[in-house]
Image: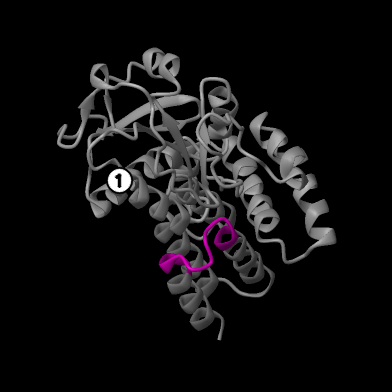
Amino acid sequence: MTQPHSLRGAIDLSSLGAPATPPAPAGSYVTEVDDASFDAAMQGSVRHPILIEFYSPRAPEQERLSQDLAALTDEAAGRWLLVRVNVDTSPQLATELQIKAVPTVAGVVSGQLVPLWQGTLPKEDARVRIEELLRMAAKYGIVGKATPVAAAPAVGEGAEPTIDPRYVAAYDAMEREDYAAARREFEALLATSSSDPIAKAGLAQSALLSRVTSANPQAAAAALAANPDDLDAVLGMADLEAATGQLEAAFARLVAAVRSHSGDEKDIVRKRLLELYDTCEPADPAVLRSRRELASALF
């Protein structure tokens, strides 16, 4: 994943002249940053993956890639945030990050830059590369959802991503890994708006992160091997699987536990499964499939 793609469609930055107006596609999870606002935007990478598109309006075939990335990003509805950087207007940033040609696409996970590709890439190939980034992020527990931002500003405005002020305290708590405080903030939001999808997802994600950060994967695996019916071991392993991107395995494990347990234990597993669903997009095929399986297990 970290090897650069073929430079088809890329241009050497030394050939660039004065900046021109970019196509600037932008949506709810797409924002534009510059030298001044870049660091602030990257702070979100401790909660969710960030995709960076380094571009120039003069790069051949740039517009198609930009449109594809924006479309993929908004389809994902917060699984990552797309940050666009015009290297013509942010040359210092391009130099510091050693961006030699554009377009270049990289990821950021917990503050660490992950090279993805240079040059243009078909949309479906780009989707595959981004999914690889998401799997890597999940291994480090970066499974949060990006907050919708305002549309990207015009080049030169240098605006930072606009975060809904209702969620600032909760996300600040997530950033400093105070998941108990984050849960309280999300619970307060849900108390006033029980259908808030962002608060609902945030509550589930902060609860999951709180559990897995104190978990020992080796001990969890050993406990499950010693007693496959131990409910705590089953729940712990499902949490670890969900946090590392193995959602289908986590869902299947819990559905099986619903079938094999009864009474209060059955209800505990059901509630945990519903909570893990909330960490995902409602229309995620894995969630829809597991919901059907859960219904069958219950009735």
Residue 268 appears left or right of 222: right
Residue 157 appears left or right of 88: right
Secondary structure beneath label 1: helix
For the N terminus, the quadrant is top left
The answer to whether 222 is drawn above or below residue 273 in the figure is above
Q: Is residue 142 visible?
A: no
Residue 199 in percent (x, y) is at 70, 54
Q: Residue at x 59, y 53 (%)?
A: 232
In this view, the residue in front, 273 or 153, is: 153
Residue on which the image places disc 1: 65
The answer to whether 289 is drawn above or below residue 92 in the figure is below
**Quadrant location of residue 137?**
top left
Report the amino acid beneath label 1: Leu
Q: Residue at x 76, y 43 (%)?
A: 165
**Quadrant location of residue 267?**
bottom right
Q: Is residue 41 visible?
A: yes
**Quadrant location of residue 211?**
top right
In the current view of this chain or complex, which residue is farthest to the bottom? 299
Residue 125 appears left or right of 145: left
In this view, the residue in front, 299 or 113, is: 113
- Tell whether position 125 is magenta: no
Magenta residues span: 276-287
Residue 118 in percent (x, y) is at 24, 32
Give the colour scheme shown: one colour
Residue 247 in percent (x, y) is at 44, 56
* Number of dots carrying numbers: 1
Q: Residue at x 56, y 23 (%)?
A: 39
For the C terminus, the quadrant is bottom right
Residue 53 in percent (x, y) is at 38, 35
- Few, some or many residues within 10 Å of mark 1 (<14, 14–19, 20+): many
